[in-house]
Every structure is written in C-alpha cells, then in structure tokens.
Image (cartoon, grey):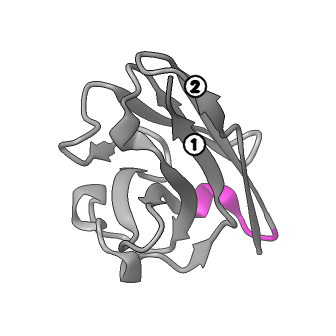
Amino acid sequence: VQLQASGGGLVQPGGSLRLSCEASGLTFSSYAMAWFRQVSGKDRKYVAAINRDGRDTDYDVDVKGRFTISRDNAKDTVYLQMNSLEPEDTAVYYCAASTGWVIVSAMRTLTSYDYWGQGTLVTVSS
C-alpha cells in the first residue's frame, strides 16, 4: 500500500493550495480517508476526513469553512482544498486511509487509520 501526497509549497497568507493524495495497492473505495498535519516538535493533529463514497465529511474546528476534503474514487485520489491560509496552517500534511466503519466524525484519532502517506510540506508566509 502506498499513499503519495503532493501539492504542498510556499503560499502567502490568504492564499490557496490544493493537496492531492493518490493511493495504490488497495481498493480505494473501501477506505475512509483523512488528512492530518504536524508541526515540527508537536503531535500530529487531525484536519479532515471523508467516508468511502464521499457523501460524509468532517473537519477540525480550526479549518472548518476554509478547507474542503473531497475524493475521486475513479482516480484513487483524495484532495484537500485549502483556502484563506494562515501562518498557523504551516505544517507537514499527511493523508491516511482507514478500513473503519464508524462515521467519520468518530475517526479523529491517529489510531483510527491503517495506512499513512509520506507527507507534503505547506508553508504559509509572506
């Protein structure tokens, strides 16, 4: 199983980025997907999750209204559209996959996920 995250980079405050995470080696439509982020020296934190068919999503309060998670099961890819970025959004962003069958709002912990990508760095700075 491989989760390949991409799309990170340097962006000014107020700008936008779209992260992508392409999965291989698994039946993508059988997995709930999520994004987490981690600042150096701190714990990895939940950002957002989406269920298998994309109809149910959940967000951390810090990103709700600014970030949108989506998926394309035909392309085995999950996305994170990030708008109105703030310096506090600077982090390495990781995608994760879960075989869990609970609602996505109950899947905010690291242990809910079976597979992890390698991370992509997002830097928000002027």
Determine crowd level at label 1: few under 14, some 14-19, many 20+ residues with C-alpha closer than 10 A: many
Residue labelled with disc 2: 11
> Relative to 12, is 75 on the left or the right?
right
Residue at 31% from the left image edge and 73% from the top image edge:
109
> Relative to 51, is 73 on the left or the right?
right
Tell me which segment is drawn in magenta.
25-31
Question: Circle 1 sits in a helix, a strand or a loop, which is it?
Answer: strand
Question: Count of labels shown?
Answer: 2
* Residue type, mark 2 in image: Val
Residue at 57% from the left image edge and 58% from the top image edge:
95
As for residue 77 lying within the magenta part, the answer is: no
Question: Residue lying furthest right in this view?
Answer: 25
Work out whether residue 30 or residue 84 is closer to the camera in this orientation and state it: 84
* Residue type, mark 1 in image: Val
Q: Are marks 1 and 2 in contact (CB under 8 Å)?
A: yes
As for residue 26 lying within the magenta part, the answer is: yes
Determine crowd level at label 2: few under 14, some 14-19, many 20+ residues with C-alpha closer than 10 A: some
Question: Residue lying furthest left in this view?
Answer: 61
Residue labelled with disc 1: 122
